[in-house]
Every structure is written in structure tokens, then in C-alpha cells.
Image (spheres, rainbow, N blue to C red):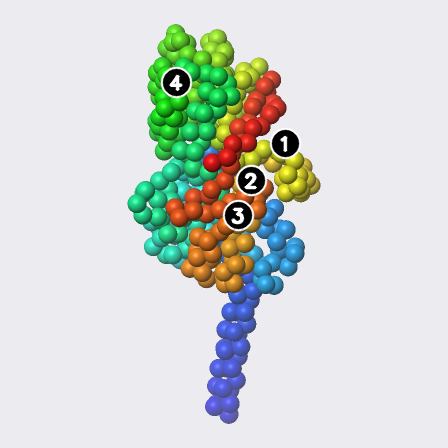
Amino acid sequence: MKKIVGVIVSLLAITMAVTGCSKSSDKIKIGLNFELSGEVSSYGEAEVLGIELAIEQVNAAGGIDGKLIELIKRDNKSETSEATSIVTALATRDKVSVVLGAATSGITKAQVPIVNQYEVPLISPSATADDITNDGVNVEPYIYRVSFIDSFQGITMANFAMENLNKSKAVILGDQSSDYAKGLAETFHEQFENNGGTIVTHEAYVKGELDFNSVLTLIAQKDFDVLFVPGYYEEVGLIIKQARELGIDVPIIGGDGFDSPVLFELAGPEALYDIYFSQAYSAIDKDPLVVKFLQDFKDKYNVEPNAFSALGYDTAMLAVDAIKRAGSTDPKEINKALASTVEFDGVTGKITVDKWHNAIKSAVVLEIQEGEIVNSVRVNP
């Protein structure tokens, strides 16, 4: 009798174990590591909205080979130390197949050695610093991005200032505490001078500053016709407002760090004229994929998506595409599929992953007049 009971108990244990495994394997885990609070939460929040829309659509269509996707969402609080703890847990405890995020360059860069160690691919929607995916000699094997890179943005805006705006004397006012801003400043400076322009002065600020009147007063005394401000919206919005109050009426241009509703709030509509910035996406694009994404996003959230939501959407869909092509939830197989991506159709454009794990794609330059985006110009790599 004891032997029979023992056999039954053993069989029950095996059955429970198998059942548990089958339930677990019915879902594909994707980890999210985003700035959902803190100084740059506007980016992370917007990108997660795009990601959640994409995954909702994939799951509604039956998932991937009948398996639904489970998002494991974490808030890194816009802090590097928090992000590294989160990505370690996602890779080792949660056993995700792929990690999405972070939004910003510095926080994404801090995760590189961790995902390389645990061999789990990571895709950032918007980390643009050139050296995140490679050092110019060796590629980081498990890091990818959907956005273009800083050097492309810097070159794009230098060319735009001279060729489209007919400007030849630039002032740079950049965030010296940001890898992202320093990268844009460096490439803009070099390209603008290569084009025959003059950098009148190159000034700096640091993240968290609120009063820019001293440096702007110094700048206002210079002879220049365009102001390039590489940085993030929290400071840039205030810089635009204070620059206009001091009578600086030249075009103010920058990178995708401008793109946040917070910048519009901080600067105010009266200051937002002759503003131009590079981005991966334009809501006024008539491409059918963009039109459908806009409508789907508005139907779900009752607001219009910005470029970061579009980048988030493409990041999720690229991950889904790679999982499908890999035919596996094994992170190593997904990584191979990501590395071989060619002309993936996204709402931010066609994406091909190059040997450095960068996205080869076009950019748009958006124009703001009277507090609203009124025009966009597409620029190819």
C-alpha cells in the first residue's frame, strides 16, 4: 500500500511539474526597462505606450505561434544604478527572451556589459550615442537600437542649418553632462565647419540647471545666425524661453531630445518659433503604416503619439519579427535574427541593422512655428 501511495505521489509531482512547465512555456517574456519616473520620464512613458499598443495587437492576433507575449515592466527611475539592477533581474530571475529599453543613451550604455554577460539581446528605441553598440573596432554583440545615431543627427542638423536655413555662423550651447548631447555637439561642430561655416562660440550647461540667463546674455552679444542646443527637453524648453526673452530671435535647432510635450509647456507658444529638430518620425507623414499607427494609438489612448511612442512601437514589432524569424524564444537565436534584419517595415521607416548593430534609416527635421509642428523634411543617410 505504501508503495502504491508513493507511486501516486510521484506521478502527481511529475504531472504538476509538467503542467507548470507548459503554463510557463505558453508565454513569451519580454522585459521593459524604462524611465517611467524621474528627470526624463517623458521619453520612457511615451515609448512604453507604443510598446504596449504593439504587443496588445500581436496578442489579439494570436501571439507568436500560439504563444502570447507577457511584458515584464520595470521603472528605472531615470537612474543608471536602478537600470543595471533591473536588467540583471530580467535576465537572471525573470528569464526574458529580450529586453526593451532604456530610452536614453547613458542608461542604455550602463546595461551593455550585463546583457553581453548573460547573452540576452537588448533593443533601445532611442539611445542614440554612437558608442553604445560598438567602439569603432568591436561590436557589442547583444545591443541594438531602432533610432539613428548621434553623429547622423549632428551631421543632419549642420547640413540643414546651412543648406535649408542658409545660416553660416553658429553658436553651440550643449549639455556637457550628457553623452547624447556631447555626441551631437561634436559632430555638428565638425560638419558645420567642414561645410564652410563658423562656430562663433561653444558654451555649455549641465543637467538640472534652471537659470540660463548668464550664458545666454553672453551669447546674445555675439554675431551669429543660428543657435544649436543639443540636450534634453527639461533644460532646452527653459533655454528657448529665456533666449527669446533676451531678444535672441535666430533659429534654435537641435536633436530628438527636443521632442516632448514638456518642452512645449516650459517654453510656451510665444517663444516657439523658428525651432527645428531632428527626429525619426513625423505625425504628418501620409505613409499608410503611419496613418494606421496614428489612428490605432488615438483609439487606444485618446491622444496623438509623439515620435518616442512610434519608436517604442517599432521596437516591440522588431522584437516580435526577430522572434518569429528565429523560430525560438531562446535569446541567442533571437539575437542572431536581430543581427540579420533587413528592411524591416516600421512606422519610423525601413530599418536595416548594419554590422555595428545600428539602424540604417532616414530622419526627418520638424519645424515649429507659433507653438505647433507645421512641417517636416525627410533626410536620407
Residue 8 visible at all: yes
Name the amino acid, label 1.
Ile
**At x 43% / y 39%, what residue is drawn?**
127
Q: Which residue is mark 3?
A: 343
- The three-letter amino acid code for the residue at tag 2 is Thr
Tell me where residue 290 appears, x and y as whole percent: 63, 39
Judged left or right of residue 148, residue 302 is right
Count of labels shown? 4
Disc marking residue 348: 2
Residue at point 53%, 41% (across, down): 311
The residue labelled by disc 1 is 284
Distance from label 2 to label 3 (Cα)?
A: 12 Å
Real-space CA distance between mark 4 and mark 2, rounded to the nearest whole angstrom: 31 Å
Front: mark 2 or 3: 3
Label 4 sits on what residue type?
Gly
Distance between mark 3 and mark 4 Cα atoms: 35 Å
| Label 2 Cα neighbours within 10 Å, binned few <14 / some 14-19 / many ≥20 | many
User: Is any part of residue 213 visible from this angle?
Assistant: no
Q: Position of residue 12 (x, y in %)?
A: 53, 79
Q: Earlier in the sequence, mark 4 or mark 2?
A: 4
Q: According to the image, label 4 marks what residue?
A: 197
Camera-nearest residue between 132 and 50: 132
Q: Quadrant of residue 375?
A: top right
Picture layout, residue 48 above or below residue 239: below
Q: Secondary structure at mark 2?
A: loop
Q: Is residue 324 above or below residue 199?
A: below
At x 40%, y 40%, the residue is 107
Tell us which disc is closer to us: 1 or 3: 3
In the image, what residue occupies the spot 44% across and 56% down? 335
User: Are circles 4 and 2 on residues that touch, CB within 8 Å?
Assistant: no
In contact (CB < 8 Å): disc 3 and disc 4: no
Q: Is residue 144 above or below residue 172?
A: below
